[in-house]
Amino acid sequence: MDHTPAHSRPKKVYFFGTCVVDLFFPGAGLAGIKLLQAAGIDVIFPQGQSCCGQPAYNSGFLDEARTVAWSQIKLFSKDYPVVLPSGSCAGMMKKHYPTLFRGRAEQAEAEDFAARVYELTQFLVDVLDLKLVDLGDPIKITWHPSCHAMREMGVGEQPKSLLRQLSQVELIDLPRERECCGFGGTFAVRQPEVSGAMVTDKIDAIAQTGAETVVSGDCGCLLNIGGALEKAGRPARPKHIAEFLWERTHARR
Amino acid sequence: MPAADFRAAAGPALADPQLRANFRRAMDGLMSKRAAVFADRDEWTALRSLGATIRARSLLQLPDLLERLEAKLTENGVKVHWAETIEQGNAIFKQILSGHDARRLVKGKSMVSEEMGLNHALEAEGIEVVEADLGEYIIQLDHEKPSHIIMPAIHKNKQQIARLFSQKIKDAAYTEDVDHLTGLARRVLRQKFAEADAGVSGVNVAVAETGTLVLVENEGNGRMCTTIPKLHIAVMGLEKVVERLEEVPPVLSLLTRSATAQPITTYVNMISGPRRPGEKDGPQELHLVILDNGRSRVFADPQLRNTLRCIRCGACMNHCPVYTRVGGHAYPGVYPGPIGKILTPQILGMETAGDLPHASSLCNACVEVCPVEIPIASLLVRLRSEAIRPRRQADSGPGVVRGAGSQRDAAETWTWRGWALAYRVPLLYRLTSFLLSRFGWALPQRLPLLKEWTTVRSRPQFAPQTLHELARREKVSNE
């Protein structure tokens, strides 16, 4: 995977919040915006944005995915990086938009857009080289890497390197951390039993770590893991990395 | 064939703790051994890229290579047969065998023969077929299909095999001693090899320039099947060909390391013809059956063609979080795991296996380990789109997936159309998200998707305000 930033430190970035963040984890999105602003970046949040189109794409409804994808591309037309608090939606835009528009009039624009897409922690580390100072109390956490962040965006070490900068945070490795949590969008409801077995194993692994908080960079995973933790009455709580970093470094709880 | 229901088929496996423990343990072992044998990332990347190139290039010239293979094999004294369907393939076998009055067969491991249902077809003619691979022998005794393409009996543990042998093998006392169990099977199989009228084998790679059939194995049963009986019939899918002999080592290195973490298998058989005058062993007659069974149709589509790169190593299933939990028997057809999810719907058709591409979280674990870089996740999405292709586009010409459009459902189609409209028009999205954030809590619990979601999860809580609203409140620039 190519980690070479296409942009040196920019003045402005676009922020694409994603639909799951918009509806379920808006605090994670706002924290992402604030982390960027605190690093001196002007953040643009186009109010017309909605979704990357992945739900329709993964369901095989490619025309519908294309329609929504194109409406997003048009909103992010200036040559600024596009930063997303999600490895999965970033993967959709970076990896699948070029395929979705291949051989069409929109191809060049889709490719230009895709080249500007960054997952948030990737941008914070690879482009901004962000330095953090921990202001919080001691805490034990574990990290859940999302499949698409790892395998589509090539984001592996960046989030962990940010978490390791926090002096009061004990990061405990999650057993079988590279295994999918079972979300998979429509997979969770089309194959609820298999998906349920996967997330059950995942929360058991989280319990093994003894962590109070499971941090991840993808709200789809957090919706899945958090819901399973709650239903099973487990003490661990889900948190998006943007929100976690913002709270630790700005002492707002 | 009736429509296969993966969800229903997975149920018994998910509820069987013994089965799940067997798979988990076996797959964990395979994953860690494979990781160790590909520890040098640069070497892996380079070799994998070479493997992908070899397979892609072979497929690009497939018709030509197959013709050259046939010509060279014929020159070497091998009789080549083409079977478009599994019925034709089985008929060819019957014809060859009846010409030799062959009643007793020993067979090395071959997934294509499983695909053809060869044992069943021959047994119906009164021909005895004995599986000579230990794993295949075990499941044949228990009348099961393989649960893994490399380790067909991986779903069974030692105790289950011990019980099976004591019940099915004559004069076998119950023992859990692995060497003893292997010895029991060996005793039976040695006799079968000696008595067999014909040997059947698969093919891992066929080399066009030399007319060589390459077969890798660890037990020596492949060597026995292909050298002891006076008649040897090999069978392969038409995608197995490569152009040059020098392309074999990298492919085999990727195959054996990905499959069992072995740098090389115990036996590497390279068969280039029947016994020649003066030679001391080998069959007097050698046949190769080349099976299409829908592969030409897969080949006709440049994207779907990548399915045919597969060298059947099984790494995709070893690393699949779905396969690990349900095992191989939940999958329709004979190829389980991720490769099955892309191959089976194309072979059996979407009417039968159209839901199979959805039995994946698209986690890409398979893509990461595939030694020939098959873009499995992208092909799953492509097949999902073929399954719901509008009927008017879904004629049955070449390049169109069999049964395309058969999973199309009006309610689902209109849901996505409505979704696309709401998510494309900013005002509609704003309205939708506003309504969900304020009134989402009132959605009834029995709503189809919510019902499935909440089997092991609490229901998702909509935030009281959307990120759009928070961004406006915080005066984040709009453009």
Image: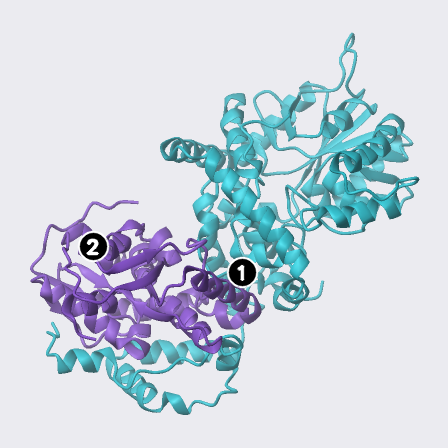
The residue wearing badge 1 is B357
Which residue is rendered at x = 75% and y = 19% of the image?
Answer: B274
Q: Crowding at label 2, few (<14), some or many (≥20) Cα neighbours within 10 Å?
A: some
Q: Nearer the viewer, residue B219 or A211?
A: A211
Q: Element under label 1?
A: helix
Q: Amino acid at mark 1?
A: Pro
Q: Badge 2 sits on which subunit?
A: A
Q: Is residue B181 left or right of residue A2?
A: right
Q: Is residue A134 left or right of residue B268?
A: left
The reply to whether residue B117 is in sight is no
- On screen, residue B165 above or below A23: above
Identify the residue under disc 2.
A165
Q: Colour of chain A?
A: purple
In the image, residue B5 sits, relative to residue B171, either above or below, namely below
- Return the x and y of residue B396 as percentages of the image width and height: 59, 59
Question: Distance between the Cα atoms at labels 2 and 1?
Answer: 41 Å
C-beta proximity under 8 Å, tags 2 and 1: no
Where's residue A103, x and y in %?
33, 54
Left or right? Give the position of A20 relative to A47: right
Give the residue displayed 29% in from the left and 56% down from the top. Answer: A94
Question: Which chain letter matches label 1?
Answer: B
Figure check: B321 above or below B215:
below
- Which colour represents chain B? cyan
Q: How is the image coloured?
A: by chain
Residue toward you, A153 or B115: A153
Amino acid type, callout 2: Gln
